[in-house]
Image (cartoon, rainbow, N blue to C red):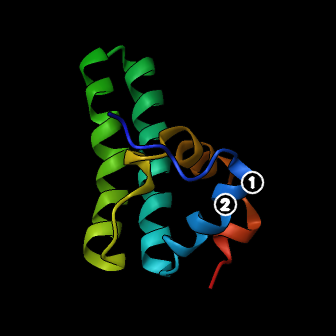
Amino acid sequence: MATEKKYKTFRSFYPYYLTEHGDLTNRTLHFIGTAGLFVILVVAIVLQKWWMLALIPVCGYGFAWVGHYFIEKNKPATFTYPLYSLGKEQSGNHEYRNHP
């Protein structure tokens, strides 16, 4: 039987998300991974090197997971709340970037 998720809305999920991203280095790694995946996407399209698309999850998740496992020492929310996490990463929210 599947475990029921604690957060039913993005609004209720957001404070938890901030606690999982308290370290500036972790947040920077998230930014690098997200920016990198967009660079890979554009380069793949421009050069028509479709194999490069396989690098997108490696770049996007790789940087974030390093930040979580080695810096924050926690489990990425992506595993339990993939849509909420992805939405937060892409929002570029001022509060997230400046979170202590």
Callout 2 crowding tier (Cα within 10 Å): few <14, some 14–19, many ≥20: some
Residue closer to the observer: 52 or 85: 85
Observer-nearest residue: 12 or 74? 12
Residue at x-position 26% and y-position 27%: 54
Identity of the residue drawn at 51% across and 71% down: 21
- If the image is split into quadrants, where does the C terminus sit? bottom right
Q: Is residue 62 left or right of residue 44?
A: left
Look at the numbered discs 1 and 2 and tell me whether their residues touch, using CB distance below 8 Å: yes
Residue type beneath disc 1: Arg
Q: Under tag 1, what secondary structure?
A: helix
Relative to 31, residue 46 above or below: above
Q: Nearer the viewer, residue 44 or 23?
A: 23
Place of residue 62 in the rendered image (x, y in percent of width and height, measured from the top left): 28, 52
Identify which residue is drawn at 47% across, 43% down: 4
Q: Quadrant of residue 87?
A: top right
Residue assigned mark 1: 11
In the depicted structure, whether residue 68 falls above or below residue 36: below
What is the number of the mark on residue 46?
none
Image spot of residue 10 (x, y percent): 69, 48
Q: Is residue 80 above or below residue 73?
A: above
Residue 20, position as x, y percentages in the image = 49, 70
Residue under label 2: 14
Q: Position of residue 69 (x, y in %)?
A: 26, 69
**Residue at disc 2, secondary structure:** helix
**Alpha carbons under labels 1 and 2: distance apart:** 5 Å
Vertical side of 92 occupied by 42: above or below: above
Q: Crowding near pointer 1: few (<14 within 10 Å), some, many (20+)?
A: few
Q: Quadrant of the N terminus?
A: top left
On the picture, is 68 further left or further right than 25? left
Amino acid type, mark 2: Tyr
Specify whether 88 is left or right of 72.
right
Residue visible at 37% across and 77% down in the picture: 72
